Amino acid sequence: MNDLLPNQSPLWQYFEGQVRALMGRYGYDEIRTPVLEQTALFKRSIGEVTDIVEKEMYTFEDRNGDSLTLRPEGTASCVRAAMEQGLLHNQTQRLWYQGPMFRHERPQKGRYRQFHQVGIETYGLEGPDIDAEVILLSARLWQQLGLDKHVTLELNSLGSLDARAAYRDLLVAYFKQHMDVLDEDSLRRLESNPMRILDSKNPAMVDVIEGAPKLMDHLDEASRTHFEELTAILDAAGIDYVINPRLVRGLDYYSRTVFEWTTTALGSQGTVCAGGRYDGLVEQLGGKPTPAVGFAMGVERLILLLETLELVPDEARPPLDVYVLGMDTAATRSALLLGEQLRGALPELRAQVHCGGGSFKSQIKKADKSGARLALLIGEDELAENAVTVKFMREDREQQRLSRETLAEMLPALLDRPLGQA
RNA sequence: GUGGAUGUAGCUCAGUGGUAGAGCCCCGGAUUGUGGUUCCGGUGGUCGUGGGUUCGAUCCCCAUCAUCCACCCCA
């Protein structure tokens, strides 16, 4: 698994902060569901024959003999919780979530066994307007993060569940006439998920795939107009997209709109956000028929992308304002008190007090390493005068000795930034 | 799940069948209370883990785990 170390966490906090603010701006509310669920929930929602359920879940028996699973994705839990808690009773919902997911795959860059997703789920809205909204929301996030020039939106429609099933049969019939050309993977998929054959990268199969019936030609009328309205809204909003008739998605519950945001900057794990409509899932899990749309994005991948493209703003890693140090034991005690006094007076001040002793010189080295803009020095003289020496660590400027009483009011000017209510 | 590569100090990496090194980092010093340069010195490693071959293995063999790349899958 993957540790998140101190030098990484500011970046995560930056990303999470952007997400949280964005969700608020669209009126989405956060939901937090458990990491553990009954195994059956995922089998019923994701699909028995998907890769996730067949070989990627962390499943075990608890002390009661119940089969539990670490969630491999967020949608199933979200639907379960919404149903159980009555959130779907004659009302619409716009929800978002965030947290770790678990899949037992072979790890590689951008793919981890414990990874994090941010997702949104909307319920009770069946029109293409909400499909458009979730896409617009994601597009705004890319724009806020500076990623908009680096991701591509791919769109497709799978049609209604009935149309999709009918098309699937058509496809199986077609490929069965060309079994000699299909590779091993595709033969397997013929049974498990025939639509994924369309996605194959095997050059030997290009012609067969090219000749296969097109999903778009077999959409039901309602799905067709739904899709047309969605693309019309995206056009009007100036969102670029590519219609990818081979975009299928791996989970069984999708219907109609599916989409994926991809990047070419991350190697083979290029999908950064993906989702779509899953109108049948709530009913399938025992609820009243409820239309639903959602997506999930991979936090590790997005953060990797921000780092690769050097899009992390400096504000994501704010440095210390001051490093307070005392020459000896008495001065250190005084430095701790000064730190408390300043934090009390200036809520936004970022101050670290030196602990652990050491020579004066080494303490100043620490002040330098800490990245603080100012060092506040307390030695015998300062102690005697009830003063503090302010040393400028990042600019060529004479140090000055100030009284402890006036220090708090002087600091905003010395640092050239407001520090909250004094 | 398949194929391949890697795993030696906190980091980046050398290295040898006879119980290991460099650079960076860290710590200390270059006289009295001042960093970012330089110089000197120092701390630090069960050589991923478990077996095996051998008088003896970090180096050879097997297994296992982890990471990375591709496939697969997906976020």
Image (cartoon, rainbow, N blue to C red):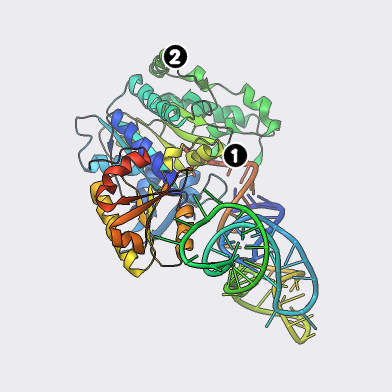
Instruction: Judge whether B63 appears above or below A50 on screen.
Output: below
Does B48 sit above or below residue A108?
Answer: below
Q: Chain of mark 2?
A: A
Asked if disc 2 and disc 1 are in contact, CB closer than 8 Å, the reply is no
Regarding mark 1 in the picture, which secondary structure is present there?
loop
Q: Which of the two labelled residues, at mark 2 and mark 1, occupies the earlier sequence position?
A: 2
Labelled disc at residue A371? none
CA gap, disc 2 to disc 1? 29 Å
Answer whether residue A63 is visible to the viewer in this image. no
* Residue lying at 46% horizontally and 38% vertically, measured from the top left: A314
Going by the numbered disc 2, the residue's amino acid type is Asp
Image mark for residue A235: 2
Question: Callout 2 environment at 10 Å: few (<14), some (14 to 19), or many (20+)?
Answer: few
A15 and B34: which is toward the camera: B34
Q: Which residue is mark 1?
A: A268
The answer to which quarter of the image holds residue B8 is: bottom right
| Whether residue A307 is situated above or below residue A145 in the rendered picture | below
Q: Amino acid at mark 1?
A: Ser
Q: Position of residue A117 (x, y in %)?
A: 41, 42
